[in-house]
Amino acid sequence: MYKHVDYYKTYGRIMQFNKNKKEPIHRWYPFVEGYSKEFIQSILEEMNREHLVCLEPFSGSGTTALELQNNGIPCYSFEVNPLMFLIARVKLENGYDLSRIDYWLNFVKNKRSTVQVTLQTEFNTLYEGENKKKWNYNKEVGIAVEKLRVTVNMIDEEIYKELFMVALAAILLEVSNLYRNGKCLSYKKKWKERKLEEGNVYQLFDNKVLNEIRKDIETAKQKVIQNNKVMLHHEDSRVGIEEKVEDGTIDLVITSPPYLNSRDYTDTYMLELKTLGFTGTSDEIRELREKTLRSHVQIKWKDDTKINNELLAKTILKLEEAAKGIEQWNNSIIDMVRLYFVDMQKIFSVLYKKMKNNGRVYFNVSNSAYFNVLINTLEICSSIAENEGFKVIEIRDARELNTSPQQQKQVGKLLEGVIVLEK
Ligand SMILES: C[S@@+](CC[C@H](N)C(=O)[O-])C[C@H]1O[C@@H](n2cnc3c(N)ncnc32)[C@H](O)[C@@H]1O
C-alpha cells in the first residue's frame, strides 16, 4: 500500500470538467471526461521551479495544454481521437481576428440556406427515414446540420473552418435525439415528439459562435505568447512521445488516461464523429479504436503480452476465479485488464525516459471493478511506475465514483485519485 492522502476537499470538485463550462475558451466544447483548469492551477502553485516544460500524453479536449499556454508554459500533447484533436487545436489557436470571424459567420449564414444536401450515410440510425424505428436526428435537424457542415467546409481559411466546425460539434448533441448517458449515448425522453426546425439549429449555432466563441476571443485579457498548438500531435502517445519529445527534457506531466471502464471515447463521441465525417465508415471506427489505449472491449485484442507485477497478477487470478461462476457479458474483460496495464507500463517507461531528474508526474485515474473484484488501478499503476524507476510520492484520494449497483454491493464505491510521482 502506498501513502494515501485525503484530498477529498481540495480535489472533490475540481477533478470534473463541469467547472470549465463557465470558463472562457475551455467552455467551447462540453467535454465530459476531463478535469478543470483549477486542477492545473493547483499543481502550478506546488511547483517551485521556473521555465517548466510539460507533457500531456492524453490531451482530450486540451485543458492541460490550454491552461499551461495561458500561463506561458510550453506543453507537448498527444491525442488519437480526431474530434478531440480538433477541439484542442481550435482552443489553442491564439491568432483569431474578430473581423474574420464576422466575415465567415456572414458567409455561413448566406450560404447555408441555398446549399443542396442529401442525407447519405453508412450509419443507418443517423438520420430519420422510412421504415426506421430509431434515428439520431429528425429530418429537419439532419438537413440543417448537414447544410452547416457543408458550408463550414467551404471556408477557405483553415483556422476559421476549424473554429466553426467546433461550434457545430458543440451543438450536435443538443439538437439530436440523444444524450450522453455516462459512457454511452441514449435516447432522450419522448424524443419522437421533439419538434425542432432548421431555423432552431441555425439559431443555436449562431449563438454559440457569437455569444461564446467570439465573446471569449474579444474579452481575452492579455495576448497569449506561448503556442502549445504547434506542440499538439494527432498521435498514439504509446508511439508518438518517443519520436516527438527529446529525452530528459520534461519537468512536469499532468494527465488523465482513459479509465479502465470497458468503453472507449469513440462511443461517447460517436454522434459527432459520424456526423462530421471523422469516421465515415465502420472500418474507420475500428481503426480508431485500435489506436486507443486498451481500456475497452469493442475489439478483440490478439496480444499475449504480460507484465511482471505482483498485485496485477493477483488481481487477474481473482478475476479468473470470479468469472468462472458468472455469465460474462463480454469474454474479453480479463484480456482488457491485462493489456490496459501493459499500455500503462509503456507510458510510464517512456515518461521516465523523457523526464528530467526530480521531474513530477500527476496522474489522475480511478479504480474499477469487474465480476465483483476490485481492480486497484491506483495501486497497480503506482507499482508499475515504481518498477520503471519513479518514486511514488503519494496517492491523493479525490472522489468516490459509483459503479453498477451490483458491483457496488460487493466492492463499494470506486476511488478516484491522483498519483504523484517523481523521477
Ligand atoms: C480522460 S481523457 C483526457 C481528458 C483531458 N485531461 C481533459 O481534461 O480534457 C483521455 C483521452 O485520451 C485519449 N486517448 C486514448 N488512447 C490514446 C492514445 N493511445 N494516445 C493518445 N491519446 C489517447 C482519448 O481519446 C481521450 O480523449
Image (spheres, helix red, strand yellow):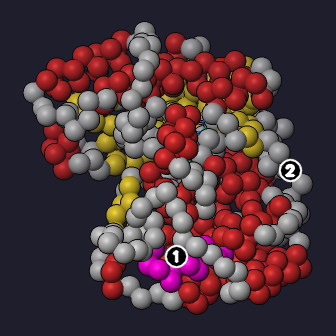
Residue beneath the point at 51% across and 25% down: 344
Image quarter of the N terminus: top left
Mark 2 or 1, nearer chain start: 1
Name the secondary structure under disc 1: helix
Q: Nearest the camera: 144 or 297? A: 144
| Circle 2 residues within 10 Å: few <14, some 14–19, many ≥20 | some
State the residue position of label 1. 142
Whether residue 21 is situated above or below residue 86 in the rendered picture: below
State the residue position of label 2. 226
Q: What is the chief secondary structure element of the magenta stretch?
A: helix
Where is residue 8? Give x, y as percent. 42, 49
Residue beneath the point at 42% across and 88% down: 195
Residue stretch rendered in magenta on the structure: 137-148
- Nearer to us of marks 2 and 1 is 1
Q: Quadrant of residue 348?
A: top right
Residue beneath the point at 57% across and 53% down: 280
Q: Nearest the camera: 218 or 262? A: 262
Q: Nearest the camera: 223 or 234? A: 234
Q: Which mark is residue 178?
A: none
Where is residue 67? Give x, y as percent. 71, 53
Camera sees residue 47:
no
Q: Amino acid at mark 1?
A: Gly
**Rendering quadrant holding ligand 1:** top right
Name the secondary structure under disc 2: loop
Where is residue 420? Give x, y as percent. 55, 32
